[in-house]
Each structure stands twice: as C-alpha cells, then as structure tokens.
Image (cartoon, grey):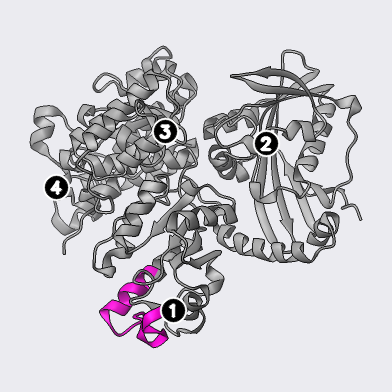
C-alpha cells in the first residue's frame, strides 16, 4: 500500500450530490457554516473546491451567518502566479473552521505593496499577509562560489525583513513567512551542503534565519520547505510550468499546500484541536475486548499487528506530552473497557492518561458532546480516531465540526493518518500547553474535593489559591495571543489581536494591560485571564476593551479578583469610571450578565453593539477573596480566612 500526503488520504471521498449540496447552502434553511465545513471536509477536486468557495462568497454577499466559521482576511504577496492556488484556499480553510477572504495583489509586486502605505495590502484591514517568495526572489537561484556567499544570505534576509517590517508599520498587520524549498539538483552531489556558496548551502542558512526572523518579528511560519522535502523536491519543482505560467510549484501539490495553510490560519484563530478521542476495539488494540478477553486482543511487541496498535498508543502519548487531552469514546461496558488499561502488560496507555472515559452503548455523537461538556471545551476541539467507517460517517454528518480522519484497513497506517492530517497545528508552544493534559487530570482531584466540601466557601479556601497579576510582557506574549484568539465562551467582546497588536497595546502608555495566572495546591493552571483597558477621550473614563478568561476557573472568585485589580490600577491612573461592553456571539452567552454580577449598571442596549455597562469607582469596594493576591513578586493580599 502506497500512501502520500499529496492525496489527502485522511479525507473521505466527496458524495455524488456534492455540487447540488454546495448550491443549496444558504437557500435550504440549513445552517450555512456547519454545511460549508462539512462539505469542505471531503477530498476535493479543484472544481469542487471552487464550488465551496462560490457558496461561501454567496453567503457572505447575502449576509448569512457563517458561524462557527471564523472570518479571516488574508493578503497574498508572491513572486509567482497564485491564481489557481487561490481557488483552492477558501475550501481548505473552511475545512479547518475558517471563512477565508483573500486579498490578492498584482504579480511580483511584493516590495512595492509592502512599502506603499496606500497599497491594497496596507489598506484592506487584513488579519495577516502571506509572503510566499522563493529562492529566485531572494536571489539565491545561482551558485555564488566566487563571491562571499554570506553577503547573499544576509541580503536575502534583509530584503525579507524589509517586507515584514513594512507590513507591520504601514498596514498594522502580521506576516506569514514561508520557508524556501531547495531546488533538487546538486552542483557537487553529496558535498553540496558543505560547500559555501552552493544554492543548497545558502538556502539552508536562509531557512534557519527565516525561523529566527519569524520569532523576532512576531510573524507566523509556514514551512513550505518541509512540505517540499516530504513530497520530493524533484516532483515539487516544475521548471516547465514555471517558465510557461510562473506557477510556484507543481499544481498537483496545490491541495496539500492549501490544507497546510488552512491549518495554520485555523490555529491563528484559536481553532487547533485540543483533544484526541480514541475508540478502543480495533483502534487502540486489535480485537474486541468484550469477546476476545484480555489474552485475545492484539497489542505489544512481537507481531506486526500488535506493534501497529502500539504505534497508535505511542502517537497518542506523544500528543499528550505536548498538551493534547486524551479521551475515550467506545461502545463497550465501562468495566470491561478499562481492563486492558489496568491489566495488560504491553499497554502504553493507562487510565491516568485518559481525562474522560466514555464507554457505554450510547451513540458516538452524544458521547462526544458529553466529553466536550465534561472538559468544558467545544466539540470543535475534538478529533475522533475510529476504525469503524459507519461510526465515522455518523459523526461527520451529526457533528461536522468534529475532525474525523478516514482510516485504511491496515492499522499500521492509523498513526500516520492522524498525524499527517495536522489537526493539532500550533503557532506557539508555551508552558501552559505542556501542562494542559496534566491540568485536566488535576481538575478531577478538584472535583473530588468539591464533592466533600461543606459549602463553596469551604471549597475555595481549601484550594490554597494564589492569583498573580502582571502587565503584558515578552515572557507571556505567546500565551496572551493564544488566549485572545482561541477563547470564545468567557470573552466579553471576542476581539482578536495579532501579536503585533498585542505588542502595541503593551507599549501604549494609555492602555492598561493585565495577564492573570492562577495556581492552587493541585497544580499550576498557568495564564487564565487577559484584560485590555484603554483610556477614552475623557481621561477619567476607561473602556474595558477585552476581558476574557478560561472557563475552567469559573466559580472561584477570579472575576472579582480581576476587577479589583483593574479598579485599583485605573484609579491610580486617574480614572473615575469604567465602561464595559458585552458583544454577543454564538458562543459567549454565558457572560451576558457578567458586568451585572460585578455591580456595573447597564446604560445602553444595541442590537449590533450588545450591552454597555458602567461602574463608578467611588462606589466600588474591594471584596474579600479566597485567594492570595500577588502582583509580580509582591504579595498584595492574603486569602480571606
């Protein structure tokens, strides 16, 4: 069996009625957003991708709600012809939960567009700009054996940095920089990497510098070089089509490139998946535990079948190590399903690795919703790995926002399909990410304490909570951007910010920024809250532009503690009044009365703007808190006893 990412084999084939289904979106009473995501979740031809794009564009023109898809305006700067590739990008983005709008520019106008403050990319209010340039644009398409090759490498990076800096300054937008694919032919053969001035050695240096440039400028990274290596640079490079049409690479790779970009955009929007849900029989082990018993299932070294299922478990554990939550969803009796985790000597996965264990005879969609509820995350955060094609089809139809990779008959390919699909794309990796899976396990311990507590006050006091406040800063910036762009439920305004905008807020003297961290005796929950508060035209009135929190800390008094800190800092800056707004979305209804609970008075109601609330600071009294309050390294207040 030959498998290649080029074919996107983790996606099922499109149904026969695909074209008609696309035409009916927005006209048949169905919810357009879920329908678009469902149809884009198939393995599409170029024409089918265009059909999805047309449906999406039609819905936008008609003002049809596309939730839960998130809007994203992307500019394209390139030295190649991207028209045919652009046709496939919106469908690939919709597959990952993004309603993509493209802003294209004339051919090979990269520098001109970036440097001109009045250019299309700088005046279109873009969320990001893809800078898709290759070795030709960077003047690295010829060997520099008789010159100083380091000068050429430096000049290439300077040119790229000029574009990135200009986009940030002129358009207030963030760049997506892609690495450079290396042409296949080697001038010295195996010695090519070692000889300064060869195309390969210079591109190697440039790619390392591009990674560093992205980190320094807060840009996002699209690793096109890694994709070219994976599919083969001989196939990736198409000199005939470059000469004839200036295509950036061979057209057969447009779908996988589009999918890779779609994953990245989804991750920027906070839509990367958080939880891997595992079926058990013939997915985590071979055989049926209820029929074959502990000794009859296949898992472990010594047989190709047993090792195939071990590879699934190993992949799951590696994902957990980087912070992905693991759950079980199996049609089984609970007691029987747990036996291999507890007793089989060759199992890598154990019960303590599983945050939610759903083994019963309820249908899979209902169980998946129960898992999401138990973890307090959206169903769009789930990936289901299931060997049963009927179960996969049922989940896709009932819950199109759940990612369900198609799997082949041979379990040796299961882990490959799961990882190749890129559901767990990341644009940052923080300490909170590493701790996430263990943190959910700690939540179970907290629930046990809650069940034994006499009342809520007793429970909160027993946790030994410490809340820490600090302004935005470089050390927590990635996590701040991540929280702002992925938090949907406890988010009063759901405004999204790029890293460049977060930096600007941090450096603005008229802006109050607050990052909030929480820990208790069971563990460190990391950064759990963000506030951005700005002075209005009246310096005595401050507007809470953004207030968001992790839902996992609801009911602990964190909201009261955050307000107390905002009030104190606003008072110190001369504020007499705070203004807070609630802008409703499809996911944040839980905070509709947030400001009312905190003592604000409602002053405005608008269909588009939501509700507006105000708090007169002279009337505010700091509450007693069941936690120790720390600002930076300074203890401000002990927990109330």
| Most common SS among magenta residues | helix
- 2 or 1: mark nearer the eye: 2
The mark nearer the N terminus, 1 or 4, is: 4
Which circle marks residue 347 in the picture?
Answer: 1
> How many residues crowd around disc 3 within 10 Å: few (fewer than 14), some, or many (20 or more)?
some
The residue that label 2 is drawn on is: 591
The reply to whether residue 182 is visible in this rendering is yes
- 4 or 2: mark nearer the eye: 2
* Start-end of magenta stretch: 290-312
The residue that label 3 is drawn on is: 31
Disc 2 to disc 1, C-alpha distance:
43 Å
- Tell me residue 455's x, y (percent): 84, 58
Which circle marks residue 235 in the picture?
Answer: 4
Disc 4 to disc 2, C-alpha distance:
52 Å
Is 225 located above or below residue 604 in the figure? below
The quarter of the image holding the N terminus is bottom left
């Amino acid at each position: 069996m030959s498998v290649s990412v080029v074919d996107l084999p983790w996606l099922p084939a499109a149904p026969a009625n695909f074209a008609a289904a696309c035409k009916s979106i927005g006209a048949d009473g169905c919810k357009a957003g879920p329908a678009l995501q469902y149809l884009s979740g198939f393995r599409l031809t170029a024409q089918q991708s265009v059909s999805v794009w047309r449906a999406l564009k039609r819905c936008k023109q008609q003002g049809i709600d596309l939730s839960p898809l998130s809007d994203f305006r992307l500019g394209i700067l390139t030295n190649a012809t991207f028209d045919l590739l652009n046709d496939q990008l919106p469908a690939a983005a919709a597959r990952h939960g993004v309603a993509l709008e493209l802003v294209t520019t004339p051919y090979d106008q990269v520098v001109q567009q970036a440097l001109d403050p009045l250019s299309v990319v700088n005046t279109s209010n873009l969320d990001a700009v893809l800078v898709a340039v290759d070795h030709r644009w960077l003047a690295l398409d010829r060997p520099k054996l008789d010159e100083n090759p380091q000068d050429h490498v430096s000049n290439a990076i300077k040119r790229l940095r000029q574009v990135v800096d200009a986009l940030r300054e002129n358009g207030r937008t963030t760049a997506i920089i892609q690495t450079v694919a290396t042409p296949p032919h080697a001038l010295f053969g195996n010695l090519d990497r070692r000889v300064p001035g060869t195309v390969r050695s210079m591109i190697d240096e440039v790619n390392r510098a591009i990674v560093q440039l992205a980190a320094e400028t807060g840009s996002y990274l699209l690793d096109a070089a890694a994709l070219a290596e994976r599919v083969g640079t001989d196939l990736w490079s198409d000199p005939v089509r470059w000469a004839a049409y200036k295509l950036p690479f061979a057209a057969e790779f447009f779908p996988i490139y589009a999918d890779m970009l779609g994953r990245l955009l989804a991750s920027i929007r906070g839509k990367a998946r958080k939880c891997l849900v595992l079926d058990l029989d013939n997915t985590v082990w071979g055989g049926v535990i209820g029929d074959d018993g502990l000794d009859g299932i296949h898992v472990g070294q010594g047989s190709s079948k047993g090792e195939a299922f071990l590879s699934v478990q190993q992949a799951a554990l590696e994902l957990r190590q980087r912070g992905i939550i693991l759950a079980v969803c199996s049609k089984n009796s609970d007691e029987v399903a747990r036996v291999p985790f507890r007793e089989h000597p060759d199992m890598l996965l154990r019960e303590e690795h599983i945050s939610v264990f759903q083994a019963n005879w309820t249908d899979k969609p209902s169980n998946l919703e129960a898992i999401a509820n138990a973890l307090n995350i959206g169903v769009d955060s789930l990936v289901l790995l299931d060997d049963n094609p009927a179960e996969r089809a049922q989940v896709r139809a009932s819950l199109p926002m759940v990612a369900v990779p198609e799997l082949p008959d041979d379990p040796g390919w299961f882990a490959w399909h799961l990882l190749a699909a890129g559901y767990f794309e990341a644009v940052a990796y923080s300490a909170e990410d590493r701790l996430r899976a263990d943190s959910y396990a700690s939540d179970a311990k907290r629930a046990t304490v809650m069940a034994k507590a006499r009342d809520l006050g007793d429970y909160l006091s027993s946790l030994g909570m410490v809340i820490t406040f600090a302004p935005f800063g470089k050390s927590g910036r990635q996590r701040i951007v991540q929280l702002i762009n992925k938090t949907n439920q406890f988010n009063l305004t759901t405004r999204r910010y790029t890293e460049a905008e977060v930096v600007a807020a941090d450096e603005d003297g008229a802006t109050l920024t607050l990052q909030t961290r929480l820990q208790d005796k069971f563990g460190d929950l990391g950064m759990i809250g963000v506030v951005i508060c700005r002075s209005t035209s009246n310096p005595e009135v401050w507007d809470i532009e953004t207030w968001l929190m992790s839902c996992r800390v609801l009911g602990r008094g964190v909201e009261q503690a955050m307000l107390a800190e905002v009030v104190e800092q606003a008072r110190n800056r001369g504020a007499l009044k705070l203004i807070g707004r609630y802008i409703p979305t499809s996911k944040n209804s839980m905070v509709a009365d947030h400001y009312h609970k905190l003592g604000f008075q409602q002053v405005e109601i608008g269909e588009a703007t939501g509700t507006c609330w105000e708090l007169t600071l002279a009337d505010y009294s700091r509450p007693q808190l069941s936690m120790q309050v720390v600002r930076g390294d300074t203890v401000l207040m002990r927990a109330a006893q």
